[in-house]
């Protein structure tokens, strides 16, 4: 059993674009357009599985957008691993920030209103605040990569390389980086044009730990761990999008 929010807005087409730009939402069920041009049903998904349904207002169905003169009766609660990034991006496209991100006993929480009258609460659980402490944390990486989709490669570029959602996420492009380091990567879905590197090199703190973690996760090892000249120790691993990544460490 599950519950899926079904919200009503005054302009569903504008709302689709706003949720794309603010939350990186994607249309997961194409709009059903009624004879009068209004959208009778559409489904959007934020991240991997935060799905919600939406429609325009319909008197015949008894559904209407929130009344701006009254307080909200419902809040949409979303678990995220990057609450500060979500709030920062939503603010740039006109969100009303009711509660800036702050740490609480239940995680890091922020509350905002979208331009369509709906109230959102984003919660970064306490156990998600240290995701960038992976032993394979990238110390140095810069690349622009095309990928089939953003969600499908999140495990590799996020959890494994330790790159967080710092920067922006517009649904078709995301900028990931490791706070306090020079590591960053821009992932772009293949239906957009962008500079593309065929391979990337990642300088890691502990290449042996990175190798063991890659094998544990089942990533394809293209070339095994080897020692080379000048204290270089490296291996090559293939990301789920097909990119061959050179994982390397240098002697201090």
Image: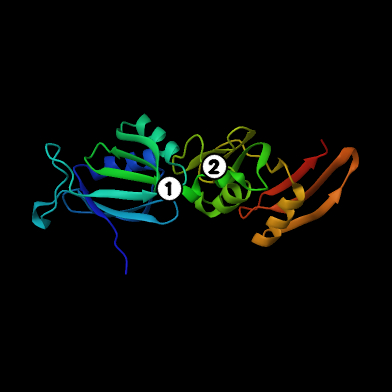
Please tell me which residue is depicted at 32% across the width and 44% down the height of the picture: 121
Residue hosting label 1: 80
- Quarter occupied by the N terminus: bottom left
Considering every residue shown, the one lying at the far front of the view is 105
Q: Is residue 174 left or right of residue 202?
A: left
Please tell me which residue is depicted at 44% across the width and 39% down the height of the picture: 170
Residue hosting label 2: 164
Q: Specify whether residue 32 is in view.
A: no
Please tell me which residue is depicted at 61% across the width and 42% down the height of the picture: 145
Q: Is residue 97 left or right of residue 182?
A: left
Q: In terms of depth relative to the viewer, which is nearer, 76 or 195?
A: 76
Q: Specify whether residue 183 is in view.
A: yes
- Quarter occupied by the C terminus: top right
Q: Judging from the image, what secondary structure is the residue with disc 2 in?
A: loop
N-terminal of the pair, mark 2 or mark 1, is 1
Q: In terms of depth relative to the viewer, which is nearer, 46 or 161?
A: 161
Q: Position of residue 2 (x, y in %)?
A: 32, 65
In the figure, 159 relative to 192: above or below? below
> Crowdedness of circle 1 by 10 Å Cα count: few (<14), some, many (20+)?
many
Residue 48 badge: none
In the figure, residue 138 lies in which quadrant? top right
Q: How is the image coloured?
A: rainbow
- Count of marks placed on residues: 2
Q: Judging from the image, what secondary structure is the residue with disc 1 in?
A: loop
Measure the C-alpha gap from mark 2 to mark 1: 11 Å
Q: Position of residue 8 (x, y in %)?
A: 20, 49
């Amino acid at each position: 059993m599950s519950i899926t929010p079904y919200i009503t807005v005054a302009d569903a087409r504008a709302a689709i674009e706003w949720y794309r730009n603010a939350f990186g939402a994607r249309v997961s069920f194409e709009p059903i357009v009624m004879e009068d041009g209004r959208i009778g049903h559409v489904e959007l998904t934020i991240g991997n599985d935060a799905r919600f349904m939406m429609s325009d207002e319909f008197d015949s169905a008894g559904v209407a957008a929130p009344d701006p003169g009254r307080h909200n009766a419902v809040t949409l609660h979303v678990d995220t691993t990057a609450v500060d990034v979500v709030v920062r991006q939503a603010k740039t496209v006109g969100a009303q920030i009711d509660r800036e991100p702050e740490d609480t006993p239940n995680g890091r929480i922020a509350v905002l209103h979208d331009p369509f009258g709906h109230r959102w609460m984003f919660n970064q659980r306490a156990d998600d605040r240290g995701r960038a402490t992976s032993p394979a944390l990238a110390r140095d990486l810069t690349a622009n990569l095309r990928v089939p989709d953003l969600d499908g490669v999140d495990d590799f570029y996020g959890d494994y390389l330790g790159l967080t959602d710092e920067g922006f996420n517009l649904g078709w492009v995301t900028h990931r980086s490791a706070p306090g380091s020079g590591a960053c990567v821009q992932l772009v879905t293949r239906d957009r044009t962008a500079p593309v590197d065929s391979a990337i090199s990642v300088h890691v703190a502990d290449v042996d730990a990175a190798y063991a973690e890659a094998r544990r996760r089942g990533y394809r090892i293209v070339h095994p761990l080897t020692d080379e000249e000048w204290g270089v120790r490296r291996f090559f691993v293939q990301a789920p999008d097909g990119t061959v990544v050179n994982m390397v460490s240098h002697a201090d």
